[in-house]
Image: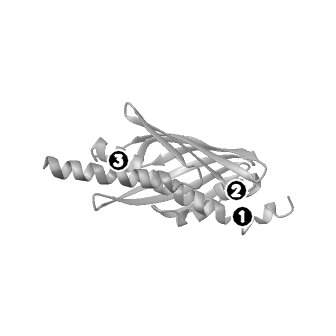
Amino acid sequence: MQKFLAIFLTLIASFALAQEAANPFDLKVVVARNGERFQVNASYDVPINVCDAFAYITDYEGAKNLPGIVDSKVISRSGNKVKVVRLLEEKILFIPFEMRSELEYVETPKKALLFEQLSGDTRYYKGSWRLVSDKDLTTFKYESQVEPNSFVPSFVIEYFIKNIIRRQFEAMAEMALQRKSTPSAACKNI
């Protein structure tokens, strides 16, 4: 059993190192546990202007094209506040898990996007997206706190957060890059 565990851990470590080597977006993901909550910090760089970057992170319904997001719908919009209902589904150890949430986003155009869960399957979920522009390169900075409300053991949740979230951010960076070839209508004259 110890040999199997050693081989398994070696394979996971080599896979993680291979992922780091193939990181064209300077993707950084840090997950830290603080009591029952997890602090998630991530950032990545994409060679697009800040207008297209903001259009990308506020494409709430387009989020359903990301790994793990089954559905994402805007249910109301008032000024700079947007309410979105989202359904996420992931498999952990071949067992499918669904999480529903209603989120309220507060938009600060071309700068930030704050969000907070109003209701859902987690006890607490709140965070922000910040955009830092340097000409045609935009750094996406994500920060959140998540407190799961689950009967799933905490080590499984921690594995999910640390590994699956990285895959989601990689997919987000790839999709943001696609904005360069198809700029937002609001950004064409900029």
In the displayed structure, does residue 65 sit left or right of residue 180?
A: left
What amino acid is at disc 1?
Lys
Indicate the position of residue 85 as horizontal and vertical percent values: 53, 57
Indicate the position of residue 93 as horizontal and vertical percent values: 27, 57
Q: Nearer the viewer, mark 2 or mark 1?
A: 2
Asked whether the beta carbons under mark 3 and mark 2 sit within 8 Å of each other, the answer is: no
User: Nearer the N terminus, badge 2 or badge 1?
Assistant: 2
- Separation (CA) of disc 3 from disc 1: 33 Å
Q: In the rendered picture of this protein, how many numbered marks are placed on residues?
A: 3
- Separation (CA) of disc 2 from disc 1: 8 Å
Asked whether the beta carbons under mark 2 and mark 1 sit within 8 Å of each other, the answer is: yes
- Quadrant into which the C terminus falls: bottom right
Residue located at (38% from left, 59% from top)? 90
Q: Nearer the viewer, mark 3 or mark 2?
A: 2
User: Nearer the N terminus, badge 3 or badge 1?
Assistant: 3
Q: In the rendering, which numbered label is found on residue 180?
A: 1
Nearer-the-camera pick, 26 or 82: 26
- Separation (CA) of disc 3 from disc 2: 30 Å
Pointer 2 residue: 47
Q: Is residue 94 above or below residue 122?
A: below
Pointer 3 residue: 159
Q: Of helix, strand and loop, which one carries label 3?
A: helix
Indicate the position of residue 73 as horizontal and vertical percent values: 57, 62
